[in-house]
Image: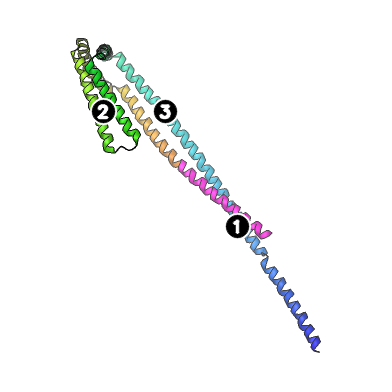
Amino acid sequence: MNRAFVWAVVVGAMIVTGAFGAEKKKDNKPSKQEIAQAEKRVEAAKRESAKARDDSDEAMKKARGDTDAATKARAALMEAKQRDSEVFNRLTRDSEQGKAIHGAQQDADAARADMDSARDKVLGQLDGDASYKQASDLVAQARAALEQLRDSGAATPEQIAKAADQINDQDTALGKLRDAALAKDPQYSAAADRFKAASAKLASLQDAMESKIRDNPERQKAVAAVKAAQDRVNETERDSRTSQAAAARARDEYNRKAAAVRSAEDHLKDLRR
């Protein structure tokens, strides 16, 4: 009887253990409900990703459109400026004042050329002057000293500033020698006086012409067109910057949604294994 009881206990234990083990294995396996929920999460993530992709495509389309509009606006501005320049030149060229300006400009250019010629002659003569050569050597020495300080890597800012001041002082002394020599040259002085007078006359004629042209209806229309074109450029470039930033944000959002789809799909695969 005792032996029968023992066997009954053993058999009962085996039955209970087997049932418990089977139940445990069943608990570790995901239920159909869990898989169904995971499938729904995948579908929901795909819908959100698809919408984000559409939003991103739309934002990119708008950004490209705004960029094209800005490009066209800049081209229109260049055309408006070209038309204004043509109007200005024509009004200047065809008027008596325009002819006077042209003559004054020629006089100024001729005087400037004579000045340059006389200047080159005087400076060429100075190259043989002992005082001028000494002053030039001092400038070269001051520049070399500054370079040595910089190359040493040990110079203080104060030393660098002092060396730079020395160069300025030597340059000033050399310039005074050149100015004195030029002032003594009659050809240079005469050309300089002519250039000064021609430049003053040219400036006066240009001011009068600009005032007259400013009141011309055709010029006013051209100037207004330039302003409108510039305003359009400012507007389209602002819109382009805004839409480009919006497109970047939309693309980032799509990337996040796409990553969420991959994560949901990976989780579903793990449940189905």
Task: Please state which amino acid type lies under the numbered disc 3.
Answer: Ala
**Is-magenta flag for residue 212?**
no
Image quadrant occupied by the N terminus = bottom right
Q: Residue at x 26, y 28 (%)?
A: 167
Front tag of 2 and 3:
2
Please tell me how crowded label 3 is: few (under 14), some (14-19), or many (20+) other residues with Cα within 10 Å.
some
Query: Which residue carries the number 3 mark?
Result: 76
Task: Please state which amino acid type lies under the numbered disc 2.
Answer: Ile
On the question of residue 205 being in view, the answer is: no
Q: Nearer the viewer, residue 119 or 223?
A: 119
Mark sitting on residue 251 = none
Query: Which residue carries the number 1 mark?
Result: 41
- Residue 87: x and y in percent read 34, 20
Q: Is residue 142 above or below residue 116?
A: below
Q: Residue at x 29, y 27 (%)?
A: 143
Mark sitting on residue 167 = 2
Residue range of the region highlighted in magenta in the rendering = 244-273
Task: Please state which amino acid type lies under the numbered disc 1.
Answer: Arg
